[in-house]
Image (cartoon, grey):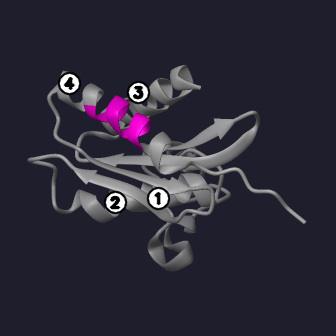
Amino acid sequence: MQFIRRLDIADTRVLMAGARAKAEEIGVQMCIAITDESGNLVAFERMDGGKVTSITIAIDKSYTASAAKKATHEYGDASQPGSPAYGIASAIGGRLMVVGGGLPVVVDGDVVGAIGVSSGTPAQDREVAQAGIDAFIVSL
């Protein structure tokens, strides 16, 4: 028997608030997605002005970080031509994201979910996602 730790809706509210505050601070309207440990969507927000095209990207960034238990930016270099994971971005129906902005949420060594952010540059997306995680960690 396995016991699974996962984010609950109260946790997602903390993650979302931290990410939203950072997005507002840097002046970029974002799409923010939060998934459980299996990559299933738990919460989503498209801030006023968040790009329509970023909806799916944010969800898939969160999905990748949850399901693969790895930050999306870690796939960037490894997925380039000639690198060991070249072509991985087409895996699982094209849902695996290799651009920064998807981070796993880790508690006591367990991935309990993830946050995915899109609408800014990859660095901005990653910064906003990290702010969400930072707010969550402080709340524990």
For the residues labelled 2 and 1, say whether their Cβ atoms are less than 8 Å apart: yes
Work out how far the residue at label 3 is from the one at label 2, CA to CA, in angstroms: 19 Å
- The residue where tag 3 is placed is 131
The residue shown at (46%, 50%) is 9
Q: Which residue is under mark 2?
A: 57
Q: Which of 18 and 116 is in front in this view?
A: 18
Mark 4 against mark 3, which lies toward the viewer? Answer: 3
**Percent position of residue 119, x then y:** 23, 47
For the N terminus, the quadrant is: bottom right
Q: Which residue is drawn at 68% across and 57% down?
A: 84
Seen from this angle, which residue lies furthest bottom?
93
* Label 3 vs 2, first from the N-terminus: 2
Residue linked to disc 1: 97
Circle 1: residue type: Met
| Residue 59 image offset from top left, x and y in percent | 39, 60
Q: Is 40 positioned to the left or the right of 110 in the image? A: left
Amino acid type at image mark 4: Ile
